[in-house]
Amino acid sequence: MKRTYLFLSAISFSAITLLSSCGGEEAPTGPKYNFERAESLPDGYLAELGIIKTNIEVTAKLYETMNKNGYSFSESAMLSAGKSFSGSSKQALGIGAIGSDMVYCAAFGQNQSAMSRMEGLMKTAGSLGIAEAFDQELIEKMASEDTTINKSVLLTKAYLKAKDQLFSDERAQYATFMVVGGWLEGLHIACQMSKSDLSNADVRLGVWSMCDAYTNVLHMCDVFKDNAEMKAIAEQLKTISAPIAKITKHAKKFSTSDVEELGAAVSEIRGSLY
């Protein structure tokens, strides 16, 4: 299970960050940007992306904690394995969402469900032209049983490599769509799983941490507010600010009813996006 979980986590992380490398068109023939010094994006974008990267790890740990503490796996909490997406923006959102579903499956040892979703993820990635963007050698190392390998360092390398492949505003837009899809799907699953049980302190902290990333997601969307689809998604996300605040402002006191309220609002947005 550990090997499968590491592999799927690597695939999920790569999916959320690597879309920016290809978009749906041919790669530029000119020199790559040094993204940290690129003038095309405002200061702070990479910092927001780094916080979301940490949130991906937090989400994976939350699912593991739920599994260890007797929470029941819910197939219905995820998108269907054969879910398809039309249009590049929705495909990007979908890749992020499927990545979250895969990590959830893997954390609960549901390998068949995880693998079926990986097929869907790679099919969607292929339609966007990014199938070759995955660093197979790095993924294999992250999935290996070699205890001498620092998996955290490898994950950081994967992140930095993906970040360097963000060539242009358009590709960074797709990466942001994936961030939104992954975060929203992870929050949806977390709410559905914990809306009736917050007795475990680590589960409570994990749910709070996912909600705390809300402002970072909005800030990333705001970078591309001139994109009509991104602006529309940001407006939808703003509708959950009140239920999010009930949790983020009361880390130790928010209730299952607060989570249920947020979960219902998130489900409504999720339904409209897919």
Image: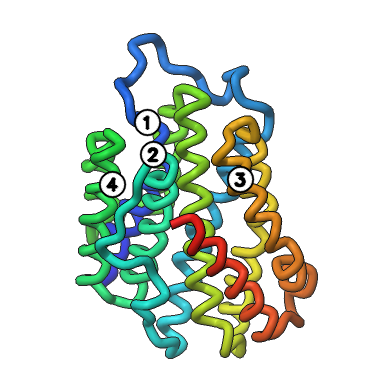
Report crowding for label 3: few under 14, some 14 to 19, many 20 or more residues within 10 A (C-alpha). Answer: few
| Earlier sequence position, callout 3 versus callout 1 | 1
Answer whether labels 4 and 1 touch (C-beta < 8 Å).
no
Q: Position of residue 230 (x, y in %)?
A: 57, 41
Q: Which residue is mark 3?
A: 232
* C-alpha gap between disc 3 and disc 1: 20 Å
Q: Residue at x 41, y 28 (%)?
A: 165
The residue nearer to you, when weighing 58 against 271, is 271
Q: Quadrant of the N terminus?
A: bottom left
Q: Spot the residue most to the right.
A: 249
Tag nearer the camera, 3 or 1: 3
Tag nearer the camera, 3 or 4: 3
Tag nearer the camera, 1 or 2: 2
| Image quadrant assignment for residue 148 | bottom left
Residue 88 disc label? 2
Q: Which residue is mark 4?
A: 124
Q: Position of residue 188 (x, y in %)?
A: 52, 69
For badge 2, the amino acid type reads Ser
For badge 1, the amino acid type reads Gly
Answer whether labels 1 and 2 touch (C-beta < 8 Å).
yes
- The answer to whether 252 is drawn above or below residue 4 in the figure is below
As helix, strand or loop, the secondary structure at mark 2 comes to: helix
The residue nearer to you, when weighing 117 against 151, is 117
For badge 3, the amino acid type reads Ala
Q: Which residue is mark 1?
A: 23
